[in-house]
Image (tube, helix red, strand yellow):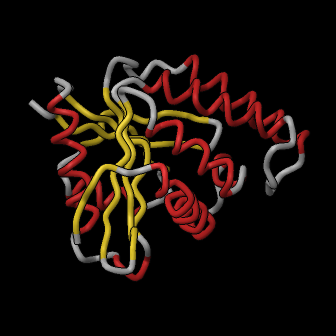
Amino acid sequence: MRIRIARKSDAMTIARLHVEAFRRMGATFLSRLGVKALSDLYSLMMATGGTIVLVAEEQEGVVGFIAGAANTRRVALLSFRVVVKALLGCYHMEMSIGELMVQGLRHGLYLFNRRLGEDQSELLIIVIHPRHQGRGIGHELVRTLVECLRRIRSESVRVLVDTRWTRALSFYRNVNFVQVGTVKTPSGLMQLLEKRLA
């Protein structure tokens, strides 16, 4: 297994992993935009400074990924571009245009108004294919992301985790994240966890 920086050619595989994982956990707004929309979002992230997308690769291909950002406002702007394309009918989605407008507005306003420390780095998502879980791949992805963030002089990294996702919360605690608060988001109540990098 090796960890590497994601390439544009990985975007569709990453999007499929994202959608499959969040369907099992109770689909969130982004995963309901569909695979093509997420593929476009990850491609944009790969091409944008201050965002990091890494993949875990084995002989059969990509088995997991992690994405982080030094500034979440950039990611919010990228997400807004994808939502606009969705409103224009560019994607096959699992929601109606009306629901997209309501949910997109709620999530957009939340992203632009939140006060989590926009100058702080954030781990946005990590997904490991179920057949490859429990082998330390997630730990290696987090370790590599942390090293990338240290190189750009980040002092800490934060992550928001749904309070119902006990396995995810346990994973983050195992990689030395500590709870620093609770945040209400359009998707529900989230624990805010932080890992000091210095």
Q: Which residue corresponds to the image point at 42% horizontal and 61% vertical from the top-left? A: 127
Q: Is residue 130 above or below residue 33?
A: below
**Could you tell whether 72 is left or right of 144 in the image?**
right
Q: Position of residue 178 (x, y in %)?
A: 24, 43
Residue at left 35%, top 78%? 132
Q: Image quarter for residue 153?
A: top left
Find residue 35 and report its image quarter.
bottom right
Q: Is residue 38 left or right of residue 86?
A: left
Q: Residue furthest left?
A: 198
Q: Position of residue 32 (x, y in %)?
A: 71, 54
Q: Number of labelled discs?
A: 0
Q: Is residue 10 left or right of residue 146?
A: right
Question: Which quarter of the image is occupied by the C terminus?
Answer: top left
The quadrant the N terminus occupies is bottom left
Of the pair 59 and 35, the residue shown nearer to us: 59
User: Image point 66% across, 28% down: which residue?
Assistant: 80
**Residue 136, percent across and down?**
21, 70
